[in-house]
Amino acid sequence: MSLSGKTVTEVSIFGESPAGWHVDRIRDRLGKIVGGEWGDDPDVHEEGVVIPVVRVADIRDLDVTTDNLTLRRVKESKLPGRLIGKNTVLLEKSGGGEQKPVGRAVLGRRITFDSICSNFMAKTDFGPGISPTFVAYLLDAAYTSGVNTAHIQQTTGIQNLRVFDYLNTKVAFPPRPEQERIAAYLDASCAAIDAAVAAKRHQLETLDVLRKTIIQRAVTRGLSESVVLDATGNAWMENIPRGWKLVCLKRIAEIQGGLTLGKQYKGSLIERPYLRVGNVQDGHLDLADVSVIELPASVAAGVELRPGDVLMTVGGDLDKLGRGYLWKGEIEGCLHQNHIFAVRCFRHKLMPMFLAYVTAAKYGRDYFEATGKKTTNLACTNATKVGEFPIPLPPLEEQKAICVHLDDKLGEVKRIVAGIESQIATLTAYRKSLIHECVTGQRRITEGEFSLAHAYG
């Protein structure tokens, strides 16, 4: 069998490799592998030096982001062999999660100052016979192909990579000149793909701002371009359209608190699904990871969500406050966390969908953030504050017209967003495929492609 007309001579974990490529264990092409060091808080003592420490959170694709590196105090005896240089590759050996397994590789080429990596990473350097950038792309291909997963063990929620077992994996290495060609070509190609993805993510951000603006305008000013405003005397909403009222939520709805996860109950218990703050997203629910809680049937019966309930997130990260969502009965018998309130509207006064839009608007979010008890980047609003939430209340027919308008306009935005997200997914998949094809020899980089990539750089 052959690749690109070349006779195949050796086999790696990726399959057959081109003639002239040498199959070897990854570790045999690496320098000494050194574990990282976390050190101490800089203010605890004065022994050692204060130095930036690269964490797993600083990984951005194949490079390290240096915008906000953590400073730690490290003993000088720990520094030899650990300083990151332009020929360094760092390997994530602890951390990970269900959606992002441990084992990512990252280059140190953009770090121009003394620094080390944390104890959740390992570090190695390369001599003149190997291209660090090629190896980083090779490890990226191994990671996206799932080669690392066979060498992961899980302890107390943290994934640990058996580094030396993983690096015993056999792969094919081309001669150094071809490594350089592949690395340069992938640097240029990935930069172009990343730029296209960044532009599309900017489009998504712009559309998100547009979506919020559309909601805010409709629920606070109505649909008329020539709206006449009247003063309310309320600091949260100083003016509302003529014919509207400003009414505390507790006067037009019933507010139901949630349950605290982990509470111990006695007697016969049943299992029930249980929504957390993280399940309630902007305009939709994330039902992929719904928790289960055990409690007596008599307790569950009084706090089950009902179709038509408006879910209001009032605890957690600041950017998650508000987030109104109209529950449609997606999960039968579902309960909810204490940081989510279920609001049941008095429907002769307030449409549930209108309240969901008000809660999701900037107006609603600003209220919950400002009235919440803050601890660093967290906040929590109690039932009293929720009950006092001032709702701009048009007549029912106008509420209905506003909801129809928003459903239509936001549906258009949603369709555009879905198209852009599909384009991002296609570009991301192409990037992974391109890296895999190049580092495994399925795609050979010509001198012309190399020159074009070099000119781009």
Image (spheres, rainbow, N blue to C red):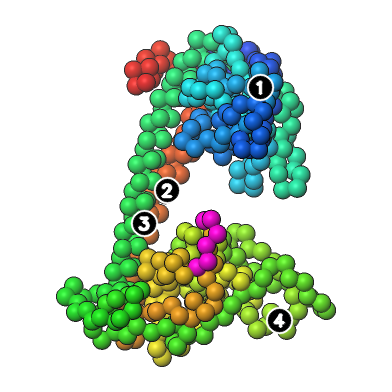
Whether residue 375 is in magenta: the answer is yes
Residue indicated by mark 2: 422
State which mark lies toward you, 3 or 2: 3
Query: What is the distance, in whole Å, between disc 1 and disc 3 at their CAs?
Result: 49 Å
- Which dot marks residue 299? 4
Kindly indicate whether the residue at mark 3 contacts the one at mark 4 (C-beta within 8 angstroms): no
| Left or right of residue 261, residue 87 in this image | left
Callout 3, which amino acid? Asp
Residue indicated by mark 3: 208
For mark 1, does the 10 Å Cα neighbourhood hold few (<14), some (14 to 19), or many (20 or more) residues?
Answer: few
Q: Residue furthest front?
A: 46
Callout 2, which amino acid? Ser
Query: What is the distance, in whole Å, between disc 3 and disc 2 at their CAs?
Result: 16 Å
Residue at left 68%, top 17%?
32
Query: What is the distance, in whole Å, between disc 4 and disc 3 at their CAs?
Result: 39 Å
List x then y, in percent, for residue 123: 64, 24
Q: Earlier in the sequence, mark 3 or mark 2?
A: 3
List x then y, in percent, for residue 390: 40, 79
Query: What is the distance, in whole Å, between disc 1 and disc 2 at their CAs?
Result: 50 Å
Q: Secondary structure at mark 4?
A: helix
Whether residue 43 is in magenta: the answer is no
Residue indicated by mark 1: 76
Q: Secondary structure at mark 2?
A: helix
Residue at left 40%, top 12%?
447
Nearest the eye: 374 or 8: 374
Q: Secondary structure at mark 1?
A: helix
Callout 4, which amino acid? Val
List x then y, in percent, for residue 79: 65, 21
Is residue 24 in view? no
Look at the image and give the residue range highlighted in magenta: 372-377
